[in-house]
Amino acid sequence: MRAPIGLWAVLVLSGCDKHEPHTHHVAIRDMQFVPADLSVSVGDTIVWTNEDIVPHTVTAAGFDSTAIESKQQWRHVVAVTGDYSYVCSFHPTMHGTITAR
Ligand SMILES: [Cu+2]
């Protein structure tokens, strides 16, 4: 089956040796992000899962989950390189970092 021309253009522009996007999981458990420090590549997805009984947020300068209720998830696709610090806006003692390369 032939792929549409638009798809070939995307493949060529993105480069065949490029890293396949990964999904990283962070648990929010006992008022902590686990793991708290994460290294990712641009294009990767991070999924936070709130295992606590109270709502939490994932809040950084460039993104904000708003409230993630108990047993719910929030996902974020990392778009640019950089070092990000984030907190839970409800519980500022909760913090994590993302290093995106
Ligand atoms: Cu919290």
Image: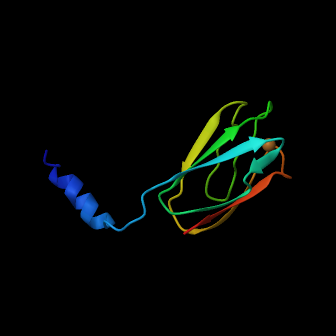
Q: Residue 74: x, y in percent? A: 61, 40
Instruction: Identify the residue shown where x is 86% and y is 52%.
Output: 93
- Evaluate whether residue 75 shows in this view: yes
Q: Residue 17: x, y in percent? A: 35, 68
Instruction: Identify the residue shown where x is 47% and y is 58%.
Output: 43
Which residue reaches farthest right? 93
Quarter of the image where the C terminus is located? bottom right
Instruction: Identify the residue shown where x is 31% and y is 67%.
Output: 15
Quarter of the image where the N terminus is located? top left
- Report the front residue among 17 and 42: 17
- Left or right of residue 75, residue 10 in this image: left
Question: Is 2 situated above or below 61?
Answer: above
- Report the front residue among 2 and 73: 2
Question: Is 3 situated above or below 53?
Answer: below
- Left or right of residue 77, residue 13 in this image: left
Indicate the quadrant of ligand 1 in the picture: top right
- Report the front residue among 63 and 56: 56
Q: Residue 22: x, y in percent? A: 50, 53
- Left or right of residue 63, residue 54 in this image: right
Q: Residue 8: x, y in percent? A: 20, 57
